[in-house]
């Protein structure tokens, strides 16, 4: 059974107030692909992201992570398989120390203490934050918090990594560190971003949303050379 791909099949979603945020969204991201999710503000990117690990469930249609449908009864397994990194790192860092934040997921998986320690070490090393282990998240810079928030999902050894605007508000060095971390992740990756340079450097394929619908799904180079599409996205005048 493979958990390493993610598939949306005719997904529609309407919020309780009646606002329709996704309309008949279908795509598949295969094992090892790094795919960008592009679109103007209000296009539905964050809503789609929240469907990848069941924080939102479709009004109609289906989301699958590998062979597992995303539904209420499968959420514990889905959330082990999909590592979701929010745009605001403070939404993920709530424990007194970095190591406690990184340990939170593995501990909830009921892993043995030795395995939890191994996962903390592995995740912090992957993001270059071993020296921050005993620090309080509130004492960290924005770039450090972003890297630690990624470590909190890497410690669960996800098959799919999903990031919402990962480079927002980062300085140049922190952004370069982030690109290195994302590039080194060998499994499936979906990245919602307005950062054109990051997308070009990391993602070979891009999906474009507008008004909750997919209007393009092509190689990234083709997306960014389509002048009409770039104007539609507001990236050129």
Image (tube, rainbow, N blue to C red):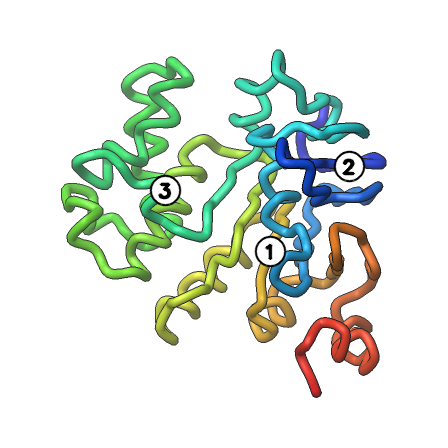
Q: Which element type, helix, strand or loop, lies under badge 1? A: strand
Give me the residue at 37% from left, 18% from top: 108
- Residue at mark 3: 91
Give me the residue at 70% from left, 87% from top: 237
Q: Position of residue 61 (x, y in %)?
A: 81, 29
Q: Is residue 58 shown left or right of residue 91?
A: right
> Residue 48, located in which quarter of the rendered image?
top right
Disc assigned to residue 192 = 1
* Mark 1 or 2, closer to the camera: 2
Tally of marks: 3
- Residue at mark 2: 12
Q: Determine the residue located farthest toward the front in the rendered image.
A: 17
With respect to residue 120, does 235 lie above or below?
below
Q: Determine the residue located farthest toward the bottom in the rendered image.
A: 237
Q: Assess whether mark 3 and mark 1 are in contact (beta carbons under 8 angstroms).
A: no
Q: Which element type, helix, strand or loop, lies under badge 2? A: strand
**Which tag, 1 or 3, sits closer to the chain's start?**
3
**Which tag, 1 or 2, sits closer to the chain's start?**
2
Pick the residue in front: 39 or 195: 39
* Mark 3 or 2, closer to the camera: 2
**Dot 1 crowding, Cα within 10 Å, few <14, some 14–19, many 20+:** many
Q: CA distance from mark 3 to mark 2?
A: 26 Å
Q: Quadrant of the N terminus?
A: top right
Give me the residue at 79% from left, 80% from top: 225
Q: Position of residue 14 (x, y in %)?
A: 70, 36
**Dot 3 crowding, Cα within 10 Å, few <14, some 14–19, many 20+:** few
**Which tag, 3 or 2, sits closer to the chain's start?**
2
């Amino acid at each position: 059974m493979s958990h390493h791909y993610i598939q949306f099949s005719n997904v529609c979603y309407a919020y309780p107030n009646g606002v329709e945020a996704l309309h008949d969204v279908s795509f598949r991201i295969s094992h090892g692909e790094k795919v960008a999710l592009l679109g103007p503000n209000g296009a539905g990117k964050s809503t789609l992201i929240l469907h990848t690990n069941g924080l939102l469930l479709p009004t109609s249609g289906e989301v699958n992570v590998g062979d597992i449908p995303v539904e209420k009864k499968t959420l514990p397994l889905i959330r082990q398989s999909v590592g979701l990194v929010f745009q605001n790192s403070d939404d993920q860092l709530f424990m007194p120390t970095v190591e406690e934040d990184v340990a939170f997921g593995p501990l909830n998986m009921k892993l043995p203490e030795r395995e939890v320690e191994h996962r903390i070490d592995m995740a912090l090393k992957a993001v270059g934050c071993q020296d921050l282990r005993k620090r309080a998240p509130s004492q960290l810079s924005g770039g450090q918090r972003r890297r630690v928030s990624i470590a909190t999902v890497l410690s669960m050894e996800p098959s799919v990594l999903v990031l919402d605007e990962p480079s927002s508000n980062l300085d140049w060095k922190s952004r370069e560190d982030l690109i290195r971390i994302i590039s080194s992740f060998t499994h499936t990756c979906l990245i919602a971003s307005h950062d054109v340079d990051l997308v070009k450097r990391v993602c070979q394929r891009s999906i474009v949303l507008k008004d909750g619908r997919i209007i393009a799904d092509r190689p990234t180079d083709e997306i960014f050379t389509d002048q009409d599409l770039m104007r539609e996205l507001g990236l050129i005048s």
